[in-house]
Image (spheres, rainbow, N blue to C red):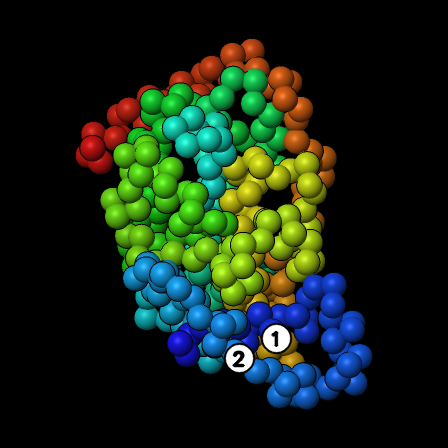
Amino acid sequence: MARHVAAALRRYRGSWFLGPDKARLRAECNNDQAAYLKAFRARTEDVQHTHDTPYQCVGQEYLDDLVLALKTGQRPSKNSLIVAIDFEGPTGSTKELGLSSFSTTQLFDTHNQAAPRLNIRDENFSIACGYGRGFAFGTTTRITLEILPRVLRNAFASYHDSCPDGIILVGHGLWSAEVGVLDTLGVPIESLPAVVGTIDTSRQLFDGTIQHLGGLLQANGIPYRPETLHCAGNDAHYTLRLVLLLVLWGLDPWHEREFGIFEVLQGLITRPLPIGTERGRQGEDDWWENMDGDLDMDFVLEIDEGDSDLM
């Protein structure tokens, strides 16, 4: 229960720094943050998460440990990679796969750079013909549904190679949506190399009350455009920013040790979208006419050649 109280307190503290109500909250407390924090009362019904799996418990503990490490300035004994996943399309007829990853080692290397810039790595894979993609954070790779399971296995094998200590898998509605799609594709979460914990932003940010992704982004001041939603790569990227927001809420910007990392992390979370971001209308992006055949066939051949050890 203690970890859930800590999570609720992070959300409560976060409202002081970000979100549409921060001006009202500060006025009610005469801009006295200490008084605001003293008013916090954790209620069992607010913080109790039912049906927590071991994956979810590890994910929550990981967040708490990461925040503690950042507050104390002590690099954690194990480094983890946070990977956000999103699927678009009905179960059994997946249209897109989005993957976004963030190495937490970046948070402990900021002192080595004069002007540190944290980075999220984004990928978008599209299967459907004529599906409006509009991926805002990179280039869409077009594949067939048949090789999608192999794409997933290879991606997570690559994540494992880059961070063998563990992967925290995150999603918005992860256990009600993405985990089921993984099962349908024959790639259950238990088979993904080094996935040790999970975080579901639809639960973590609002104590189990499901909230739309766009609503959470807007409420917390994270830049987005409504027309960019429901592209898997974009939704994965936005979800990862929400997870980093949970980390930010645990930091104190007025503490000398924490101010620098708070400022850098907030800069990533609130970074403006790339110029010209927009989602293409349905029917504008034909699979065959617009596909870069050489590029995508090279990708398919790479998947075929590298997949034998993962089957």
Q: Which residue is mark 2?
A: 42
Position of the N terminus by quadrant: bottom left
Most distant residue in the top direction: 289
**Which residue does the image show at 53% across and 79% down from the upper left?**
42
94 with respect to 309 (left or right): right
268 with respect to 201 (left or right): right
**Which residue does the image show at 26% across and 48% down from the upper left?**
190
**SS category of the residue bearing label 1:** helix
**Camera-side residue of 223 and 79:** 223
Q: Position of residue 91 (x, y in %)?
A: 41, 32
**Which residue does the image show at 72% across and 35% down from the upper left?**
276
27 with respect to 150 (left or right): right
**SS category of the residue bearing label 2:** loop
What numbered label is drawn on residue 13? 1
Q: Separation of disc 1 and disc 2 at Cα?
A: 12 Å
**Camera-side residue of 103 and 200:** 200
Few, some or many residues within 10 Å of mark 1 (<14, 14–19, 20+): many
Q: Position of residue 288 (x, y in %)?
A: 51, 12
Which quarter of the figure has residue 183?
top left
Observer able to see residue 136: yes
Residue type highlighted by circle 2: Ala
